[in-house]
Amino acid sequence: IYRRMFRYIVERFRLEGATNVLWIFCPNAESVPYGSHHSATAWNRPEAYYPGGDIVDILGMDGYNWGKTKMKDKDGWESRWQSFREIFEPLYRNLKRLAPEKPILIFETASVTTGGDRTAWLREALAVVGEWELSGVCWFQADKEADWRLDIRRDAQSVGNVRRATSAAQAWIRRWGK
């Protein structure tokens, strides 16, 4: 159903002559609900609902390091500290198999400070982004469910690391405008 809906919308835009639209497929790094043995159910894996390379321009991923902010008795599930690589690698590998030629971005990510070292987490994240040659990363700069925000007073080293590792003018987006 998702594939049909996605394709229907894209086809409508194309029929109307809208050529200034990029179509993004952006699953969550953690597929829930889970089936048996903590793996995604058959219908809830990206390859089961990927709309197709002929209509998807960009691949994306969303995922968060919840640290130790969630407790089973209070929240219904228990979170643990996870590295950037641990969160994203399974989905990244899956997306590379689905469409190796498409750019991949992280459209939403962040880490809490509870349960680990967020500065080290972010340093590792930026290294992995470079290693995988991801085209961009969007930090979830909000205080919602947890305080994900990077703050120059509290996170001076992390903010500096991000500024040094990123650019406002990513080269990949320029070719889409031509």
Image (cartoon, helix red, strand yellow):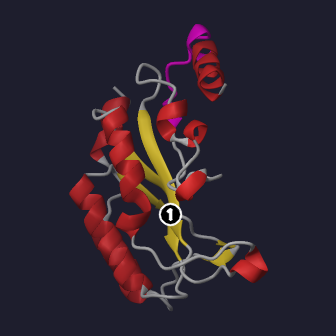
Residue 143 shown left or right of residue 53 in the figure: right
Q: Position of residue 126 (x, y in %)?
A: 31, 68
Instruction: Based on the picture, tell me whether residue 99 belongs to the magenta stretch.
Output: no
Residue at 45%, 74% (x, y): give it.
Answer: 82
Q: Is residue 134 above or below residue 78?
A: above
Q: Name the residue tied to disc 1.
A: 109
Q: Quadrant of the C terminus?
A: top left
Residue at 39%, 81% (x, y): give it.
Answer: 158
Kindly identify the amino acid type of the residue bearing the numbered disc 1. Thr
Q: Can the viewer see residue 50 in this picture?
A: yes
Residue at 52%, 41% (x, y): give it.
Answer: 45
Residue at 56%, 75% (x, y): give it.
Answer: 66
Q: Is residue 23 above or below residue 45?
A: above
Q: Position of residue 31 (x, y in %)?
A: 56, 51
Q: Which residues are magenta?
A: 13-25
Q: Quadrant of the N terminus?
A: top right
Q: Can the viewer see residue 163 in this picture?
A: no
Which residue is farthest bottom?
Answer: 153
